Amino acid sequence: MSDLWNNTIGYMKKASKALNLDEEILDALLKCKRVLEFQIPLRMDDGKVRYFTGYRVVHNDALGVSGDGTRIVAGLTADEVKGLALVMSIKHAANGIPAGGAKGGIDADPTLLSEGEFERLVRGYVRGLFPRGAKVDVPGADINTSAKTQAWMLDEYEQITGIHSPGAVNDKPRILGGSLGGEDATGRGMYHLTLKICEEQDWAPEDVKVAIQGFGNVGSHYAKYLQSAGFKVVAVSDIKGGVFNPDGINIEDLLKYSRMTGSVVSFPDARQITNEEILLCDCDILAPSAVEDVITLRNAGDIKAKIIIEGANGPITPQADDVLYSRGIVVVPDVVANAGSAIVCHFERSQCATDNYWDLETVQAKLENQIIKSYVSMKNTAKELHISFRTAAWVNALKAIVKAMKLRGLL
Ligand code: NAD
């Protein structure tokens, strides 16, 4: 069993206890509707054929079409994909998205493949998937997949079916039916949550110090939006290390520097810190936006931030989560905090279904409206049941899924 699967079971159990759900219902919620594992034969450039394992898991689709990303990483396992699919069911339901949870991927290291081999692998994945289409299960992008791979996936799907179906694949380029506002949706969603929380705390942006671990898609867009609103981004890190300046770092300059040098490390006008130190630095808001399991029992007691916004999936272990809750540190959990891209993926499906594409302002306004609604609903549940934001988000999600399953006669 992977940690991810065990952690998700733990959160599921906590939420089902808060909801007084029967054991049988919990058992049903822990089952995945469909687990597909298949072999992808890939003709390599040297003429030999190698086999790669592909996965697609649909955890639950009681609320609607299942969807979410496809990751291509070495060592990917069925358990990991199952855990990720379950979290997507929760993420969709906690954010009022009428969609079920799925995840897929290939156990492969793309850096060891040529561009041609990579394209053939992605297309082979779609053939092995028995693609089910816009009304059933919609694969999107995730680690090592992007608009480019999604364009190949869509093309392969349409070659198989002979039917134009832009809604069959998510995260594709705009010209093939993708949505505007998808690229930075996660960072933008976090920014709206940050503004909302600061408003509630009566904190003026210029007085708020934010530390961000991870300066990739999520962290860099979040940082950019924060700076534009006057927040002080005091610390930023990437895989190589971090930088700290108590007076605030100029994010535009840091972006230019990291594009030029490949890292934020040694950015002038800031002190060097490690990835362990950034989590413990002097800040009001901490946004772990890189990888999972960085806040553990080892460091949870020393965190100085008053608010943690989980940009990454699962950056806090369940045990550390309990410590933070007991210390009164507010954690906005991943299933709401980083739901921006899942929300815009839903917008993408809506636009494809009607063949009517929205302008950027419309996408952004709808994103803000949806993520704030999810936050308020989570907060109200937390207050009502005296539980953490995380458990409250899972409670809201389970309520919706269980209701849909009962109405369908599945419980
Ligand atoms: P990315 O690959 O664009 O960026 C990751 C960043 O984290 C990079 O700056 C990298 O250097 C840094 N990093 C990698 N390993 C690290 C380590 N061990 N310690 C410290 N820093 C490290 O990825 P991303 O799209 O920004 O995603 C980041 C996290 O957010 C992941 O957990 C991802 O699953 C989650 N997430 C992303 C999105 C999205 O829309 N991109 C949506 C939801 C959740």
Image: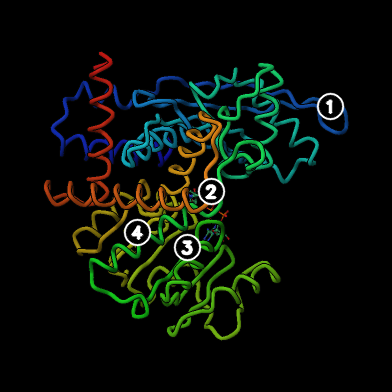
Q: Residues within 10 Å of mark 4 (few under 14, many from 20)?
A: many
Q: Residues within 10 Å of mark 2 (few under 14, many from 20)?
A: few
Q: Secondary structure at mark 2?
A: loop
Callout in the foreground (2, 1): 2
Q: Which residue is mark 4?
A: 193
Does residue 87 appear to the left or right of 263 in the view shown?
left
Q: Residues within 10 Å of mark 1 (few under 14, many from 20)?
A: few
User: Is the residue 36 above or below the residue 344 in the image?
Assistant: above
Please state which amino acid type lies under the numbered disc 3.
Tyr
Residue 76 can be seen in this image:
no
Q: Which residue is mark 2?
A: 359
Q: Secondary structure at mark 3?
A: helix
The mark nearer the N terminus, 2 or 4, is: 4
The mark nearer the N terminus, 3 or 2, is: 3
How far separated are the C-alphas under marks 2 and 4? 22 Å
Q: Which residue is mark 1?
A: 48
